[in-house]
């Protein structure tokens, strides 16, 4: 596989040279610079290289020491200077867009390293669970070869732990608590889950066991240090504050939309979505109460919405049935997408799995698509059962939130025609550089997934019951953007955030509690859904206006997805609107 990957890079280089005829010096200069940056980036972040599908560095872990961090700063400063020697106006459109993406990436990296400095206050930076798990779960090479890389990474764990203990200073309590939980999951992965793979290559067991002992010894000492030393001294403020939040939001959204506009538009859209949610609830309510009249009273409207949602929430899965139910929803959403000719559906395999323990505690589900450099195209749709340490009341609350109808909505978002479909299209995008493939846009990805939910509802998927959940999900998107900003810039308390999520967003207590934690841990990320959806819909509306009767929905979707996952402002440029 390494030989094949090396050959792939050679072929890409040859094709780039072949395509040079007719291109100007600026294009050639940028393509070399971009190639050099990516080469250095992949070598500097081997765990990221693995996830992208470049397996030349699978035996290494990221250097999280202060020396490694300084190396990353110097690397990005160097390329920031080199970028200034290129005039983007002299580049072809595809390279001009990738120039903008790379410039943003360099600026964002320097902000993260020099100003945000999470390595000092976020213990989750030192979680190596994903670095081990990614080598096991994908069949990109013979298992024996992958286990050799696992062994080497296990032997490097003490260096990561040493960096954590040297760098971390007064983190926020919620970050340390999450790290404690996730570190337990990482230890369980290494101590227990790894056996399933080692048993298939018994000859490597003595080497793995020796490396495992080294890693577990270090991780156990780290667990004790987290619990007994770091946690009592975790008094830092998890709130970014207005200045840092504003800067981080700009880099996260890759858009010129201001922090203030995000908040005002989210508040405006929240009210409109609540009104649409009421109309859908009234439609369901009138099935058994045909004489029911509409009310203009907001309190009465909210009561009816909650009443209908409560009734729908009575149909929900549990830890034993959730995976099988998700499999059913995947079959149904795929068939519906094909029958309604909404978008070209790829045939890349998708596998539903139980979320690994070390990754739990932030989201209910996620889509793990293959990297753009990966030969093996399988996507994993991970679903999290309720954690074992949750109370029975909280478990029921969570599953009432993620009820049978909501799980249809969740599958649309995470898989079909959401993340799985969009990322499968993105992995087919080709350009003179790998910039767009490697540095994808979160607002594009989340904007497409939330937009896909609307398209499915517009075509009648699941009837008003699933539409209730889609509208509730979009109401959640608006509320999330509001609390994301208010928590980090305006001192919104947990009580205030919970009240807004439950009373304005109609969320169950379990979902709201999880979202509070997520908002604290992943500042600005929750805003990508709202802004991405806002911009994706604006592109659809403007393009449909431009083409008039010549507009074709499937062709529009296929065209949008053909660009990879760039910032949405570039999609607008490429579509001529």
Image (cartoon, grey):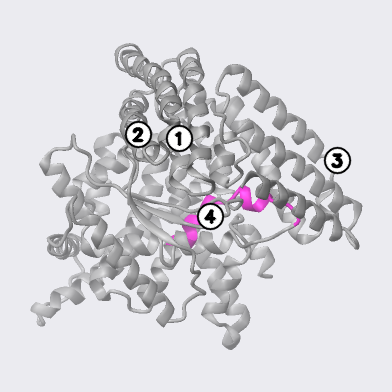
Secondary structure, mark 1, is: helix
Q: Look at mark 2 in the image and give the residue it sits on.
A: 189
Quarter occupied by residue 510: top left
Q: Look at mark 1 in the image and give the residue it sits on.
A: 132
Which residue is at 84% across, 53% downward?
Answer: 27
Which residue is at 49% across, 46% downward?
Answer: 260
Q: Marks 2 and 1: in contact by CB < 8 Å?
A: yes
Marked residue nearer the N-terminal end (3 or 2): 3
Q: Residue 9: x percent and y percent?
A: 72, 49
Q: Residue 129: x percent and y percent?
A: 42, 33
Secondary structure, mark 4, is: loop
Q: Residue 480: x percent and y percent?
A: 37, 48
Nearer the observer, disc 3 or disc 1? 1
Secondary structure, mark 3, is: loop
Marked residue nearer the N-terminal end (4 or 2): 2
Q: Look at mark 3 in the image and give the residue it sits on.
A: 85
Which residue is at 43% across, 28% downward?
Answer: 208
Task: State left or right for residue 235 relative to residue 87.
Answer: left
Q: Look at mark 4 in the image and give the residue it sits on.
A: 376
Question: Does the rendering let one see residue 421?
Answer: yes
> Is the residue marked by circle 3 packed among few (<14), some (14-19), or many (20+) residues within 10 Å?
few
């Amino acid at each position: 596989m390494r030989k094949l990957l090396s050959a792939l890079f050679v072929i890409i280089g040859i094709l780039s040279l072949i395509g040079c005829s007719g291109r100007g010096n600026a294009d050639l200069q940028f393509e070399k610079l971009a190639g050099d940056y990516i080469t250095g980036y992949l070598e500097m972040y081997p765990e990221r290289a693995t996830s992208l599908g470049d397996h030349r560095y699978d035996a290494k872990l990221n250097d999280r020491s202060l020396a490694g961090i300084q190396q990353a700063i110097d690397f990005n400063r160097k390329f920031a200077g080199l970028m200034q020697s290129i005039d983007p106006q002299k580049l072809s459109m595809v390279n001009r867009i990738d120039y903008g993406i790379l410039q943003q990436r360099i600026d964002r990296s320097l902000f993260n390293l020099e100003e945000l400095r999470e390595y000092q206050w976020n213990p989750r930076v030192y979680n190596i669970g994903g670095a081990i798990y990614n080598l096991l779960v994908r069949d990109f090479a013979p298992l024996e070869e992958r286990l050799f890389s696992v062994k080497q990474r296990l032997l490097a764990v003490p260096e990561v732990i040493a960096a954590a203990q040297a760098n971390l200073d007064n983190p926020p309590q919620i970050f340390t608590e999450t790290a404690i939980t996730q570190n337990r999951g990482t230890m369980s992965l290494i101590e227990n889950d790894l056996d399933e793979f080692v048993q298939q290559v018994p000859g490597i067991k003595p080497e793995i066991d020796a490396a495992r002992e080294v890693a577990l010894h270090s991780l156990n000492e780290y667990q004790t240090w987290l619990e007994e030393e770091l946690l009592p001294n975790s008094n830092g403020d998890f709130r970014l504050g207005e200045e840092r939040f504003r800067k981080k939001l700009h880099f996260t959204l890759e858009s010129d939309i201001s922090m203030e506009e995000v908040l005002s538009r989210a508040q405006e859209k929240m009210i409109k979505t609540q009104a649409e949610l009421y109309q859908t609830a009234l439609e369901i309510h009138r099935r058994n109460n045909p004489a029911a009249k509409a009310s203009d009273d907001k309190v009465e409207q909210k009561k009816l919405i909650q009443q209908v949602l409560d009734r729908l929430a009575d149909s929900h899965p549990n830890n034993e049935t959730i995976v099988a139910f998700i499999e059913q929803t995947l079959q149904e959403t795929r068939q519906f997408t094909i029958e309604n000719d909404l978008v070209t559906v790829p045939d890349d395999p998708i596998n539903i799995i139980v979320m690994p323990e070390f990754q739990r505690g932030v989201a209910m589900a996620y889509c793990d698509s293959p990297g753009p450099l990966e030969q093996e195209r399988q996507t994993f749709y991970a679903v999290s059962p309720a954690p074992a340490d949750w109370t029975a009341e909280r478990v029921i609350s969570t599953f009432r939130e993620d009820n049978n109808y909501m799980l249809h909505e969740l599958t649309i978002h995470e898989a079909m025609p959401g993340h799985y479909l969009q990322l499968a299209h993105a992995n087919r995008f080709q350009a003179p550089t790998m910039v767009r493939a490697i540095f994808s846009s979160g607002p594009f990805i989340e904007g497409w997934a939330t937009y896909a939910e609307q398209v499915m509802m517009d075509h009648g998927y699941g009837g008003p019951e699933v539409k209730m959940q889609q509208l509730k999900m979009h109401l959640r998107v608006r509320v999330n953007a509001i609390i994301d900003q208010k928590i980090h810039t305006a001192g919104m308390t947990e009580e205030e955030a919970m009240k807004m999520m439950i009373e304005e967003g109609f969320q169950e207590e379990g979902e709201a509690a999880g979202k509070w934690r997520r908002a604290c841990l992943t500042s600005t990320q929750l805003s990508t859904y709202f802004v991405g959806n806002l911009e994706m819909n604006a592109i659809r509306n403007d393009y449909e206006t431009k083409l008039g009767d010549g507009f074709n929905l499937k062709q529009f979707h296929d065209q949008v997805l053909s660009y990879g996952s760039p910032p949405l402002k570039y999609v607008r440029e490429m579509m001529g609107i």
